[in-house]
């Protein structure tokens, strides 16, 4: 019998919410991030997901997770809108939450943190926005912080190359305009998710030569095989494990109950380097920054 070696304390009712339709439940915590670019008037957008980190003394905190590059720079916009479906019975619309990003001097507000090592991950402490906009109908759909798997847990549970994964977001302007509900897509783990990925010298040189883009040699994460387009940035990557009974601090998995755990966050996809210079054809590969980075970014809030 396989044991999941993370201690996760969840009520039976909350477990049932995830088990009945895991991906559908998690999709309710996903929203559209967008802003109007002052430089060209275009609307730039990406994906954001709400995560809950419990505390020992109260309900805990809510964080909005996305990529750093999804946020505007000061010269483009000083705020961003988060639109999320209203998951209330008989209501089919969406909520718009404006999130100020910069103060008048162009400094980020303190409720915004980025990965300290420079990875493309952003965490926004969302508590005040959550309360002000009365979003507590989302309480049972927020993704638990404990569901962010580190490399050790991925290794112990034999999550590996070839496993199917899911990501939820807003690829290439696709979303339901009536209620801002996101799109669920799937792919496969393409490289070892327990090890950092090192790009080849040939690839880095080709990227720089064709697009003038300089990438870091190491990706703190792995690659997935999947069709990823603009707007998918910030989408969390889920792997579904069978669950769940707690026994002496470990979770024992049983058939019939599916729970998705987070392996990482989508950062970017790639154009085909072998195509003609004027081609915008993409290869079905995208980068996934490890969930360990998401965890450490959230942990910057003390």
Image (tube, helix red, strand yellow):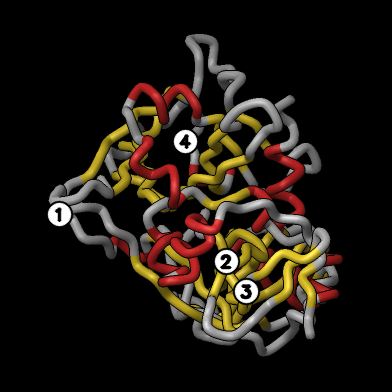
Distance between mark 4 and mark 1 Cα atoms: 25 Å
Query: Disc 2 vs disc 3: which is toward the camera?
Result: 3
Q: Earlier in the sequence, mark 4 or mark 1?
A: 4
Circle 2 packing at 10 Å, graded few (<14), some (14-19), many (20+), is many
Q: Residue at x 67, y 69 (%)?
A: 245
Horizontal arrangement in the rendering, residue 260 relative to residue 40 (left or right)? right
Task: Kindly report which numbered mark, 2 or 4, lies closer to the viewer in this rendering.
Answer: 2
**Which mark is on residue 243?**
3
Mark 4 lies on residue: 72
Q: Are marks 1 and 3 in contact (CB under 8 Å)?
A: no
Mark 4, residues whose alpha carbon is within 10 Å: few (<14), some, or many (≥20)? Answer: many
Rounded to the nearest whole Å, what is the CA distance between mark 2 and mark 4?
A: 23 Å
Nearest to the eye among marks 1 and 3: give it. Answer: 3
Disc 1 target residue: 178
Q: Residues within 10 Å of mark 1 (few under 14, many from 20)?
A: few
- Of the two numbered discs 4 and 1 in the rendering, the one whose residue sits closer to the viewer: 1
User: What is the secondary structure assignment of the residue under circle 3?
Assistant: loop
Labels 2 & 4 near each other (Cβ < 8 A): no
| Percent of width and height locating residue 93 | 17, 47
Gap in angstroms between the C-alphas marked 2 and 1? 25 Å
Mark 4 element type:
loop
Q: Are marks 2 and 3 in contact (CB under 8 Å)?
A: no
Left or right of 178? Residue 130 is right
Label for residue 237? 2
Report, in whole angstroms, how far the alpha carbon at label 1 lies from the one at label 3: 34 Å
For disc 3, the neighbor class at 10 Å (few under 14, some 14 to 19, many from 20) is many
Secondary structure under tag 2 reads strand
Q: Is residue 298 above or below residue 179?
A: above
């Amino acid at each position: 019998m396989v044991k999941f070696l993370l201690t996760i304390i969840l009520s039976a009712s909350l477990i049932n919410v995830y088990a009945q339709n895991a991906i559908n439940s998690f999709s309710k915590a996903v929203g559209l991030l967008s802003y109007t670019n002052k430089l060209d008037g275009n609307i730039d957008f990406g994906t954001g997901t709400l995560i809950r980190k419990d505390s020992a003394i109260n309900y805990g905190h809510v964080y909005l997770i996305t990529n750093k590059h999804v946020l505007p720079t000061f010269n483009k916009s000083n705020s961003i809108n988060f639109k999320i479906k209203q998951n209330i019975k008989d209501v089919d619309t969406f909520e718009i939450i404006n999130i100020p990003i910069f103060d008048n001097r162009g400094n980020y507000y303190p409720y915004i943190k980025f990965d300290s090592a420079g990875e493309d991950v952003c965490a926004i402490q969302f508590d005040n926005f959550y309360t002000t906009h009365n979003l507590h109908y989302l309480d049972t759909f927020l993704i638990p912080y404990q569901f962010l798997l580190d490399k050790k847990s991925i290794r112990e549970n034999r999550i590996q190359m070839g496993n199917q994964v899911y990501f939820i977001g807003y690829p290439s302007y696709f979303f339901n305009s009536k209620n801002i509900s996101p799109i669920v897509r799937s792919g496969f783990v393409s490289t070892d998710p327990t090890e950092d990925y090192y790009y080849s010298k040939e690839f880095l040189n080709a990227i720089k030569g064709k697009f003038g883009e300089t990438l870091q040699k190491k990706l703190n994460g792995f690659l997935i095989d999947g069709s990823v387009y603009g707007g998918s940035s910030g989408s969390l990557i889920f792997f579904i494990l069978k669950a769940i009974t707690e026994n002496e601090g470990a979770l024992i998995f049983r058939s019939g109950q599916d729970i998705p755990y987070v392996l990482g966050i989508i950062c970017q996809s790639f154009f085909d380097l072998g195509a003609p210079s004027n081609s915008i054809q993409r290869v079905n590969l995208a980068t996934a920054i490890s969930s360990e980075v998401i965890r450490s970014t959230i942990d910057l809030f003390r």
